[in-house]
Amino acid sequence: MEELDPLQKVDLAMLRAEHQKRFQTMITYLKQKIGEGIEYRNAVAIAVISEQGAYYQLTDLPEEFAGAAGDDIEHSFLTTEEALKILSEAASITRNTSKETTRHYSLLALYSRRGIIDRKNCYLYDFRSRDDIAPPVVLEIGSFRPEQMPLFFKIKADSAFAARNSGVQAGISFCLANAGDRHLLVHIPYSGDQVTDLSESLDTTTIQ
């Protein structure tokens, strides 16, 4: 397994401390709702699918977590070609996001274990449009590699443009590479004003 160097371990410890203060209680709550299930893992992430829901969390940063409890969660197993097609479609949307068509769109791809703290081994795009007045907030880190299958990728979409022009569905989709002889894809649906962050209320069943 790929190892982190001492400086990267310090950076990771600081990042974990920040995330733990904000999200640990919420993560514990949602895990209890989802319960035990089938577990898939690789060097970067772990995914659990149960009859009550599904979630993922990163191995070196367990506080980087997304999941939901409910019976409308979908999962499938993809070939590398199928997974890269979905990922390429998701990346193409980043060139066309605007506040008129997109409230939130993000794409995270981790190409190695170091990706969470080393921008040379990841790609991150995040677009957020909060209201009609303020300009959207856009963050882009690293480089997208269209022909390389990442160990993990996540797409979060609340975008009319994405829904009309690609196979990217509204909600959170994450893919764990090498789950057996294929790649695990999980989709957690949501739409519009139904999107709720668990950090705002423990009454909801979705956290990102």
Image: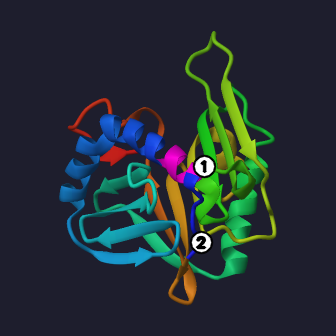
Asked if the stretch drawn in magenta spans residue 9, the answer is yes
Please determine whether, in this image, residue 104 is positioned above or below residue 61.
above
Residue receiving disc 2: 2
- Label 1, label 2: how far apart the Cα atoms are: 14 Å
Disc sitting over residue 49 in the figure: none
What's the amino acid at mark 2? Glu
Q: Earlier in the sequence, mark 1 or mark 2?
A: 2
The residue depicted at 64 percent of the width and 65 percent of the height is 112
Furthest residue in direction front, as rendered: 6
Residue 148 at x, y = what percent? 76, 70
Please determine whether, in this image, residue 31 is positioned above or below residue 198.
below
What's the amino acid at mark 1? Ile
Q: What segment is highlighted magenta in the picture? A: 7-12
The residue depicted at 69 percent of the width and 30 percent of the height is 138
The residue depicted at 62 percent of the width and 52 percent of the height is 108
Residue 45 at x, y = what percent? 47, 66
Number of labelled discs?
2
Residue 13 at x, y = what percent? 44, 46
Residue receiving disc 1: 117
